[in-house]
Image (spheres, rainbow, N blue to C red):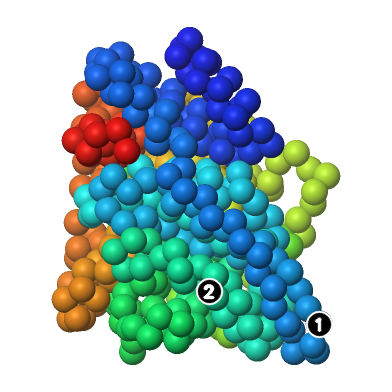
Amino acid sequence: MSQYVKDLMAEVKAKNPAEPEFHQAVEEVAASLTLVLERHPEYRAAKILERILEPERVILFRVPWVDDQGEVHINRGYRIEMNSAIGPYKGGLRFHPSVNLGILKFLAFEQVFKNSLTTLPMGGGKGGSDFDPKGKSDLKIMRFCQAFMSELYRHIGPDTDVPAGDIGVGGREIGYLFGQYKKLKNEFTGVLTGKGLNWGGSLIRPEATGYGSVYFASEMLSTKNKTLEGKKCLVSGSGNVAQYTVEKINQLGGKVLTMSDSNGYIFDEKGIDAEKLAFIMELKNVRRGRIKEYTDKFKSAVFFPADPKLDYNPLWNHKADCAFPSATQNEINGKDAQNLLNNGILCVSEGANMPTTLEGVNIFLAAKLLYGPGKAANAGGVAVSGLEMAQNSMRLPWTKEEVDSRLKLIMNKIHTTCMTMADRFGTPGNYVNGANIGGFLKVADAMIDQGVV
Ligand code: NDP
């Protein structure tokens, strides 16, 4: 670690105690940017990185709501408006009991670089609540969403801050949030993305993160003259990103062996084909059940319950060619990374945000694996959110084919940017450096142009 990164990290940790995920995200980016800051002292003099890691604004608010039995509940709501140098704040809302300031700051920080990589004019933000939607009735979800938006609405707007979904926030939640915003503001604007198709949503937005992550994997494989055809794939998660990752892998001829939720994972050696995926989509999106139920229906599969005593995740210890972590942060540790390599993995494309620990990342990089970090590989979701914003501004919807071809082109451009930047700064094939540097330069130049604000 360079002296610059050491000093920076000491300051970040002192100023932001008890935010380990935020420290982790900053350390990874700072290590990549050492190369840039040596060549460009003007960024260092203008303290660009120091400014980027301080949110422009953090909004923290009380969310009181009454459930259908009349009981009062209090949750905590957040919106981190991280950086608006290249466009309105943009990034998802996460509803999960683990949500805290440090997790949202890491996500907002990553989002700044990711949004810049998409080539679209979007700044970075993130938000959410420690509310747990799991197992709650639609009525409870609606009441919570209305209470959450009753405060958030005064801080967001189509030209200010445009939230979207993330863990625990899908189409249902975006609908309730949008309805409450519209009622409070008396205006119909593209203030949220991931909307329903009948009321301003974009075709392909639900699919975009998963599809994009698979397109990115295909781009990485193509540098070695390989494709996904016939490749065995490990996927974690069974939510939005995981589902459409599996769909696209199947379309491109790959075979998916695993999916998971927080209770454990299923291993299906025959592959999770389109029919089995339809079962999972109904299970997760309509019945809101647990992944274990898959094994009741498909006897070729085995369920492995999550075991908190293990210091590795057995999902990553099967023989496979490609891995698509698509659940949550830090789901691949050093031991998992080593297990993947020992089993002959060719390529890892991160659908989730920061699913690999720093130790795991360093193991992948040392092995010169085709390793696509989340801020590049999962940027397809926010990219199509950006396209949804464009369609809302024009008040014109594009066809599925048009959005999908733009998504493919954007993923291709992100891949090219990563490769070019990694080469330019002397670390060919290092997508981590490529993504961090490519994302940084555009934001840094905009910040210099706009002065110290
Ligand atoms: P969903 O809520 O739709 O699905 C999340 C999935 O991950 C569920 O299967 C969930 O299981 C599992 N999961 C969540 N937390 C944990 C945990 N702590 N341990 C084990 N499993 C867990 O979310 P998304 O699919 O939207 O998001 C998945 C990842 O992708 C996140 O990292 C998110 O930030 C990232 N991402 C999402 C984008 C999007 O467009 N939605 C865009 C870019 C990145 P369970 O139901 O049991 O909790």
Is disc 1 surrounded by few (<14), some (14 to 19) or many (20+) residues within 10 Å?
Answer: few
**Residue at (80%, 89%) from the top-left corner?**
69
146 vs 440, nearest the viewer? 146
Q: Is residue 174 visible to us here?
A: yes
**Looking at the picture, how far across and down is residue 131, in whole percent?**
67, 67
**Looking at the picture, how far across and down is residue 420, in whole percent?**
21, 32
**Looking at the picture, how far across and down is residue 44, in whole percent?**
33, 19
**Looking at the picture, how far across and down is residue 343, in whole percent?**
56, 39
**Residue at (19%, 81%) from the top-left corner?**
395
**Residue at (34%, 61%) from the top-left corner?**
160
Checking the image for residue 71, the label placed there is: 1
Secondary structure under tag 2 reads helix
164 vs 381, nearest the viewer? 164
For mark 2, what is the residue? 149
**Residue at (24%, 34%) from the top-left corner?**
451
Secondary structure under tag 1 reads loop
Is disc 2 surrounded by few (<14), some (14 to 19) or many (20+) residues within 10 Å?
Answer: many
Q: Of label 1 and label 2, which has the lower sequence position?
A: 1
Identify residue type, mark 2.
Answer: Met
